Structure formats: structure tokens, C-alpha cells
Image (cartoon, helix red, strand yellow):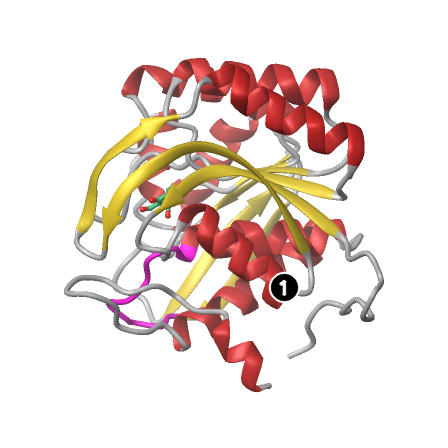
Amino acid sequence: MNYLPLPHPGETPVRVLTIAGSDSGGGAGLQADIRNCALLGVHALCAVTAVTVQNSLGVKGFHKIPDDVIAAQIQVVCDDIGFQAAKTGMLASTEIIVAVARAWRDHGPAVPLVVDPVCASMHGDPLLHPDALDSLRTQLFPLATLVTPNLYEVRLLVDIEVVDSESQRQAARALHALGPMWVLVKGGHLRPSRTSTDVLFDGTDFYEFDTPRVDVIHDHGAGDTLATAIACALAHGFTVTDAVRFGKRWVTECLRAAYPLGHGHGPVSPLFRLRA
Ligand code: PXL
């Protein structure tokens, strides 16, 4: 497949800001975002929102970073370094979502913002306080270029049970009404199916993206990987439809390269790229 253009040695790369939580197991969250950016030739800037205590068996707990510290991380990289796209992952609480939304409105450049509405880990461990769903809908979604919920997050956000392509489109409409420019409803958890079909909606048209289903038990960090790859492609100036097409192909390759780690679920992996 064609990847993104790589920077020449000594040349300042394209930058993406990730606003996300740390995963001590290194599979998802900030660590996945930075790893994917690096292997796509993009420099990752990081605003850390929370530190999870986590291994391959699950999230044992997390510590939230004070919201003024999160806002300050965003402000200083905006003021000095600059970036061509940003993405959000784990935001943990209402206070953090409000602080991120305010920092983005006050300091954010006019670049694409991908909001991955992370609510829980793959093990079902909560990563977002249930009270914070409302601030996600009202504060952050209206600022987003693209939101990328999975079916579990769709149910929490708009109370729609996606069971087929019709309800997937209905969910995309309901999410779009909350204010983002584009919505990608990921169908990866719709079974049984030999393909993974994601539906993209811009308020007028629907676009479907089909990739072969890769059935692996090591799929930790798949959502983070997709959202980061989309943000990297947007940072390179791709249209949203082209960026989503690129992100889907990238996460499919990362799923094929997923590896076991610890006693539970290992991560999807962009490390295959080092052999290419
Ligand atoms: O994959 C979602 C995710 C995002 N961010 C952090 C996580 C996880 C899943 O476990 O731990 C920090």
C-alpha cells in the first residue's frame, strides 16, 4: 500500500497533537498514538490527560492530570511548535473535557480535530465517567472535524443499538446532529460478518468503507490506531474520505501484525512498517 510521505533527515516533520491517556502496558492510548505517528513519519505532540495503571489483563485504575495542566500542555505546543491536525482519546472526566474544549477554542489552530470518544477499555473497564458523556456531546463534538465512535460508544452517546447497516446510518445521523462535521460509525463489532464496514456521514452523503475482518484476539489499541492514522493523513492534507480510507487500510495491516503480550490481549502493531 502507499503510505504517507516521509520527512527527509533534518527536515521538520508534519506534526499531530494527541490529547490522550497513558497506557502503562504500552498497547493503547498515548503510547499507541506516538508509535503510529512515528511509523507514519509524523512527529507526535502530546497533552497527557490521565495515567492508567494497566497491563494486558485490564485497567486497574487511573490518575487524572489536573485540567489546568492539560490546558497548559495544549497552549504551549500551540504557541510554539504548531501542528497540522489533532486527535483526542481518553478524556476521563467532565472537567477535563471542558478544559480541552476551552483550550481548543482559545488556542487551537484552524486544523482538523479528530475526536475518538473513548469510553471504556476493550475489557470494559471505564475510561470516562458516565456523567461526562453530556460534555462530550455538547462541548467537544461541535468542535470536531470527525468523531469516530464504535458501536458500544454509539449506544452510550445516542442510545441507538446498531444491528445492521440501516441502524448504523441512523446512528450516524443522530451523532451528526450533535455538531461534528463528519461522523464515522465503526462497524468492527457487528457480527457475524466477513468484512468490517464503517459508515462515514457528512450530514448529506453516506460513504461506506469495507475492509476484510481480521479476527485476532490481540486487538488492543485498534481504535486509537485508526483515529491516529486518520489524523496523520488529514495533517498531510488528505480529504476526510481519503484519510478514512487510508486509516482503515493502515489499521487492517496493524491488526494482521498484532502480537501477543503478557497474559491477556496484545496490541495491534504498526511495527511491520520497519520491515517494509
Ligand atoms: O483503546 C482505547 C484506550 C485509549 N486510551 C487509553 C486506554 C485505552 C484502552 O484501554 O487504556 C489510555
Q: Along the horizontal axis of the image, is 117 left or right of 209?
A: left
Q: Can you tell me which quadrant of the image ligand 1 is in?
A: top left
Q: Secondary structure at mark 1?
A: helix
The relative height of residue 226 versus residue 261 in the rendered view (above or below) is: above
Quadrant where the image shows the N terminus: bottom right
Q: Which residues are magenta?
A: 213-222
Q: Along the horizontal axis of the image, is 169 left or right of 11?
A: left
Quadrant where the image shows the C terminus: bottom right
Image quarter for residue 229?
bottom right
Farthest-out residue, front: 10
The relative height of residue 274 versus residue 255 in the rendered view (above or below) is: below
Residue 138 visible in image: no
Image quarter for residue 205?
top right
- Name the foreground residue: 206 vs 222: 222
Is 216 part of what is drawn in magenta?
A: yes
Write the residue at 52% across / 32% down: 173
From the image, tell me which residue sits under label 1: 246
The relative height of residue 5 versus residue 71 in the rendered view (above or below) is: below
Q: Position of residue 108 (x, y in %)?
A: 73, 26
Q: How many marks?
A: 1
Q: Position of residue 8 (x, y in %)?
A: 83, 70
Residue 247 visible in image: yes
Write the residue at 46% across / 22% down: 136
- Name the foreground residue: 111 vs 38: 38
Write the residue at 61% across / 21% down: 72
